[in-house]
Image: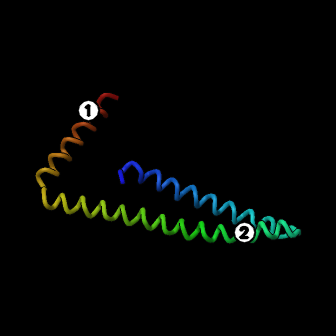
Amino acid sequence: MTDTTHPSKDKLVSDLKVVVSDAEELLKLTAGQAGDKLGDVRVRLSERLAIAKERLIEAEAAVVEKTKKAAHATDDYVHAHPWQSVGVAAGVAFLLGLLAGRR
């Protein structure tokens, strides 16, 4: 999996949290409404919200786990190749300095 997918996963998790929150609020607002069809919809929505919450927790845990693995891999590489890491950091800092100097 590429690094560019991590921000989109984070955004997806954030968006899903908002949707779940909105759906829960909708359930609370329609609690006083009567009707068999509305009751059936509320039950199905409640079940699907529970499933969505579980999947959201799993997705968030997966993102955190992958982030930790990437951090550990980076730490291991820096410890194994300190001078190469310093060179890369210096190169990145130089490029950022050039870009910042142009503004």
Residue at the (48%, 64%) spot, across then down: 59
Residue at mark 2 to residue at mark 1: CA–CA distance: 57 Å
Crowding at dot 2, Cα within 10 Å, few <14 / some 14-19 / many 20+, comes out as few
Circle 1: element type? helix
Place of residue 45 in the rendered image (x, y in percent of width and height, measured from the top left): 71, 66
Residue at the (86%, 70%) spot, across then down: 36
Circle 2: element type? helix
Q: Is residue 92 above or below residue 26?
A: above
Query: Hey, what amino acid is under mark 2?
Result: Arg
Place of residue 9 in the rendered image (x, y in percent of width and height, measured from the top left): 47, 55
Q: Residue furthest left?
A: 83
Q: Quadrant of residue 64?
A: bottom left
Point out which mark residue 98 bears: 1
Q: Nearer the viewer, mark 2 or mark 1?
A: 2
Point out which mark residue 44 bears: 2
Residue at the (23%, 42%) spot, across then down: 93
Q: Quadrant of residue 15?
A: bottom right
Place of residue 94 in the rendered image (x, y in percent of width and height, measured from the top left): 21, 38
Q: Closer to the camera, 12 or 83?
A: 12
Place of residue 91 in the rendered image (x, y in percent of width and height, measured from the top left): 19, 41
Q: Quadrant of residue 95?
A: top left
Circle nearer the N terminus (2, 1): 2
Query: Hey, what amino acid is under mark 1?
Result: Leu
Residue at the (69%, 66%) spot, across then down: 24
